[in-house]
Structures are given as C-alpha cells and as structure tokens.
Image (cartoon, helix red, strand yellow):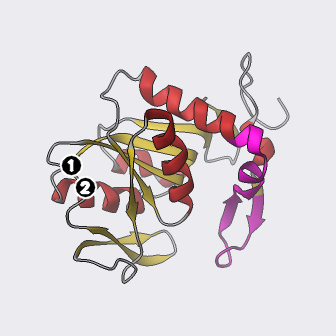
C-alpha cells in the first residue's frame, strides 16, 4: 500500500488520525500528533476497545490499575481502566502531587525529566498496566515501571497507541508485553498492529 500500512479485515488504518509535525518540540524531531484521534469520538472509542482487546487476548491478569503517564497517557489510562472498571493512577511531573510521593528520573530522546507517584496508591502485588501515547526510547515507560515496582505493584504490561520502533523502546522494557496500535519502522512507514 502507498502508506506502508498493512491492511487487515476490519482493522482501521489508524494513521488516518495521526498528524506529523516536523521540528517539534525541537529541530530534527518528528512529532506524531494524536489529537485528531481524540477529537473523533467514534474512532477514539474503537481505538481504546482495540487496545483493551489486545491486552486481554495476551492472557495475562486483568489490570487492577492502569497507570497513565502525564499528560497524554492520562487519556489512554482512563479509557482502558473504564473497560475493566480498574483504578487509574497518575504518574505526574515533579512537584504536581500534594502528598508524599516517590520520584524516578529518566532521559528522553531530547532531554531529561522525572515522574512522581504518590507513595500509597498500589496494594502490594496489584496488577498494573502502564499506558502512554507513544513508545519512543522507552525512558518514560521504564521510569513508570520502576515507580510501580518500587511501590510493590506488579506491572503486567504496557499499552501505547504508537511505537517508534527504530528508537528501541520495546527492547528497553525487557520481557513484559507491549501492546500498540501502530508501529513506525526505521523507514518511517507504519504497520497497523491492532
């Protein structure tokens, strides 16, 4: 196909709802903007259903919590948690939480950052799915994983709308399952996975 997307029966070309923004947030970065997907209620509901179905088809435990990474990950976490009546946890930027929190610093492909999570929201051993919009280098997701593990939760996998495979994020996350709707290869072409 012209777009490089593998079409399957009843699987939308999710890239229709992805807008490419050159040189954002800095020169040389190609930002994949998902706001068109969130603006289309029917498409967003189907995307969330599709991602949730991938998670459950894996056969792992049903998440008791979905942890969203600030800020776009909050949208994905809430949509997925709603499908399982699971709790939502918020991994916030430093200084945004009102109570005692645990902090994990990490490197991005274009800078450094940190995440914080309240110290008490996860019962020991509770299954937690980590959600964000894009898997790039995996630094943010790895920091979220470490937050949950340090608070004695059990990470059962990761859910993303997009994966930039050439940046190696999946490998950084080890053996845990990674669920995504679209994977962009090194050539920039997209493969629809769900």
**Image disc number at residue 136:** none
Separation of marks 1 and 2 at Cα, in angstroms: 5 Å
What is the x, y in percent for residue 23? 72, 73
Q: Residues within 10 Å of mark 2 (few under 14, many from 20)?
A: many
Residue placed at 22% from the left, 42% from the top? Answer: 126
Observer able to see residue 191: no
According to the picture, the residue beneath numbered tag 2 turns out to be 148
95 and 87: which one is in front? 87
What is the x, y in percent for residue 154? 22, 43
Find out whether residue 159 is within the magenta segment.
no
Q: Is residue 20 above or below residue 165?
A: below
Q: Is residue 4 left or right of residue 54?
A: right
Q: Is residue 192 above or below residue 165?
A: above
Observer able to see residue 172: yes
Residue placed at 18% from the left, 49% from the top? Answer: 123
Farthest residue, direction front: 85
Residue placed at 71% from the left, 59% from the top? Answer: 33
According to the picture, the residue beneath numbered tag 1 turns out to be 153
Quarter of the figure with residue 92: bottom left
Quarter of the figure with residue 28: bottom right
């Amino acid at each position: 196909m012209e777009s490089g997307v593998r079409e399957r029966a009843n699987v939308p070309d999710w890239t229709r709802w992805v807008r490419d923004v050159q040189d954002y947030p800095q020169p040389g970065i190609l930002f994949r903007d998902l706001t068109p997907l969130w603006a289309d209620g029917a498409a967003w509901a189907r995307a969330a259903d599709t991602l949730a179905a991938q998670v459950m088809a894996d056969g792992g435990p049903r998440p008791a919590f979905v942890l969203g990474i600030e800020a776009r990950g909050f949208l994905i976490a809430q949509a997925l948690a709603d499908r399982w009546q699971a709790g939502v946890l918020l991994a916030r930027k430093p200084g945004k939480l009102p109570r005692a929190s645990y902090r994990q610093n990490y490197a991005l492909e274009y800078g450094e950052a940190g995440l914080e999570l309240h110290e008490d929201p996860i019962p020991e051993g509770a299954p937690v799915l980590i959600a964000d919009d894009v898997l790039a280098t995996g630094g943010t997701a790895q920091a979220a994983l470490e937050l949950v593990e340090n608070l004695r939760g059990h990470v059962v996998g990761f859910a993303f709308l997009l994966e930039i495979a050439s940046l190696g994020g999946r490998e950084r996350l080890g053996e845990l399952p990674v669920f995504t709707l679209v994977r962009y290869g090194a050539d920039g072409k997209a493969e629809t996975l769900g």
